[in-house]
């Protein structure tokens, strides 16, 4: 009897069937969560009451200036609840000044901060706290340079972060396809950094060791190599080493740091810790691994869905699952079928729809993919490295799959066969027929993965 496999397809699902004997591993999909998930507010309040390596936050902020970073709207999460809980805790301490920084990185602050501002202002009013909201702009000339990392990245930061006595990050963690883990260091670089800082740091994504599951603060020493995050950690530490005085000059006076981080989904939290960032983060990495890491035998055929929107709306987002799930599951010379509707988001121009979230990212990611797909891999690396711009790491990673690993990728979705072919992809009209054809070959087994942007697949 064949086994039915259900894959996420945008906001819908699609089913295929296969003989279970041909599956090299059980169906891979996001786990329900560690322990019993509980309402976010309750869990966050409990974490703040029992921090590690730091006194309670309300004691730290008493009579001091405070800055807190929260992610922007590009990333779905618990922003509203986090802001409510954190500003309540901060208000209880009686700080002298509070700033909330929306960490946009290089995203457009006019697009990705309005709801964060609204939730910040509502929470501040609720808890009777005066708060200055800062929508980070990576091109703001008022950003302040504090030094250069060991890897040559100029660290250029929001002044309101450097002015604060207490510097807080309220973060939601997960595996990340080039940083290893989306973690507290990304809340400084790229979140509140200047464009030059972000570009130099992101060039390190071209290194093979800048990959999911590897991170400089990972509890396993064998998994600490990651140039991208080593550089970001250096910048994070530098961001705490200096204070911007009222005269606009930097002083070698460290700010106090505090992190609350969590493994979350929708309105629940599975795991959280608060306190010293460098003590919290290894625990968060371990929790992310327990929650969302899978090991499988690398196989000839992989069928994968990135999950629902926004990951599934454009190839730009679908690409994440190539690194998070496909890369660890597929053999060299393998073939992959991707359930990616690539139907675009509202308001996107027709020539961009399904390829990228906006015209700029399409020009850098997709247009360069089309331009370079017939170029030798070593020449592609040299050109991208020497002329690096943001989003080109995605181009590099797709071409590396095609050219180094000899992977063929079929997309089941709304993009036409002609458009897909321009970028080196192939079109699948019928997923069941695609599977049946390969079953008939009798030359390899299958790995099936759903929610590939929300988990990490590593080879056995």
Image: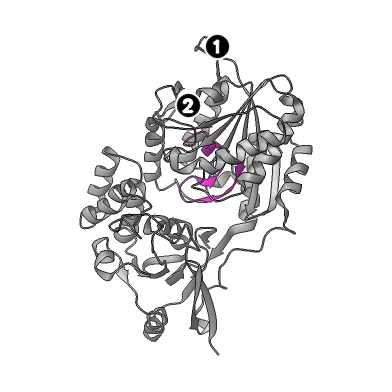
Residue at the location (44% across, 45% down)?
210
274 to the left or right of 183? right
Residue 432's disc number: none
Percent of width and height locating residue 260: 67, 39
How is the model colour-coded?
A: one colour
- Numbered disc in front, either 2 or 1: 1
Q: Which residue is mark 2?
A: 157
15 to the left or right of 378? right
175 to the left or right of 286? left
Specify whether residue 189 is painted magenta.
Answer: yes
Percent of width and height locating residue 244: 54, 16
Q: Closer to the camera, 68 or 229?
A: 68
Label 2 crowd (10 A; few <14 / some 14-19 / many >=20): many
Quarter of the view holding residue 316: bottom left
Farthest bottom residue?
A: 1
Percent of width and height locating residue 279: 67, 37
Q: Quadrant of the N terminus?
A: bottom right
Label 1 crowd (10 A; few <14 / some 14-19 / many >=20): few
Farthest top residue?
A: 247
- Find the magenta span and give its range: 171-192
Tell which circle, 2 or 1, labels the residue nearer the N-terminal end: 2
Vertical comparison of 402 with 364: above or below: below
Tell me the CA gap for discs 2 and 1. Answer: 16 Å
Let me know if residue 2 appears in the view: yes
Residue at the location (64% across, 38% down)?
122
Vertical comparison of 416 with 209: above or below: below
Q: Closer to the camera, 85 or 325?
A: 85
Quarter of the view holding residue 80: top right
361 to the left or right of 95? left
Q: Secondary structure at mark 1?
A: loop
Specify whether residue 178 is painted magenta.
Answer: yes
Q: Which residue is mark 1?
A: 246
């Amino acid at each position: 009897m064949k086994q039915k496999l259900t894959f996420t397809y945008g906001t819908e699902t699609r089913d295929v069937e296969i003989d279970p004997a041909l599956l090299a591993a059980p169906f891979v999909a996001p786990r329900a969560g560690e322990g019993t998930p509980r309402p976010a507010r309750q869990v966050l309040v409990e974490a703040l009451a029992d921090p590690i390596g730091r006194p309670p936050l309300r004691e730290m902020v008493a009579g001091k200036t405070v800055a807190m970073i929260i992610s922007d709207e590009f990333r779905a999460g618990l922003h509203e609840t986090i802001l409510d809980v954190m500003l309540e805790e901060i208000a209880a301490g009686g700080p002298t000044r509070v700033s909330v920084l929306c960490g946009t990185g290089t995203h457009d602050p006019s697009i990705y901060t309005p709801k964060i501002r609204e939730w910040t202002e509502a929470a501040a009013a609720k808890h009777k706290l005066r708060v200055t909201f800062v929508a980070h702009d990576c091109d703001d000339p008022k950003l302040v340079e504090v030094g250069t990392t060991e890897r040559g990245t100029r660290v250029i930061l929001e002044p309101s972060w450097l002015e604060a006595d207490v510097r807080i990050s309220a973060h939601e963690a997960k595996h990340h396809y080039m940083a290893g883990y989306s973690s507290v260091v990304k809340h400084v670089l790229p979140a509140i950094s200047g464009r030059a800082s972000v570009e130099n740091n992101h060039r390190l994504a071209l290194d093979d060791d800048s990959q999911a599951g590897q991170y400089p603060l990972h509890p396993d020493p064998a998994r600490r190599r990651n140039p991208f995050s080593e550089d970001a950690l250096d910048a994070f530490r530098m961001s705490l080493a200096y204070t911007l005085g009222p005269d606009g000059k930097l002083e070698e006076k460290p700010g106090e740091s505090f992190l609350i981080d969590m493994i979350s989904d929708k309105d629940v939290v599975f795991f959280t810790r608060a306190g010293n960032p460098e003590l919290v983060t290894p625990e968060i990495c371990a929790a992310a691994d327990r929650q969302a890491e899978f090991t499988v035998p690398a196989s000839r055929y992989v069928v994968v869905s990135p999950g629902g929107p926004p990951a599934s709306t454009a190839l730009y987002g679908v690409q994440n699952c190539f690194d998070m799930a496909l890369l660890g599951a597929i053999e060299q010379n393998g073939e992959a079928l991707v359930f990616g509707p690539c139907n675009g988001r509202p308001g996107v121009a027709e020539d961009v729809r399904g390829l990228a979230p906006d015209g700029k990212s399409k020009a850098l990611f997709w247009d360069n993919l089309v331009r370079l797909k017939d170029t030798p891999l070593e020449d592609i690396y040299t050109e991208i490295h020497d002329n690096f711009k943001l989003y080109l790491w995605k181009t590099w990673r797709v071409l590396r799959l095609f050219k180094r690993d000899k992977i063929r990728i079929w997309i089941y979705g709304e993009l036409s066969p002609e458009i897909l072919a321009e970028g080196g992809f192939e079109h699948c009209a019928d997923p069941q027929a695609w599977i049946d054809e390969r079953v008939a070959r009798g030359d390899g087994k299958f790995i099936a993965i759903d929610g590939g942007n929300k988990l990490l697949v590593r080879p056995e």
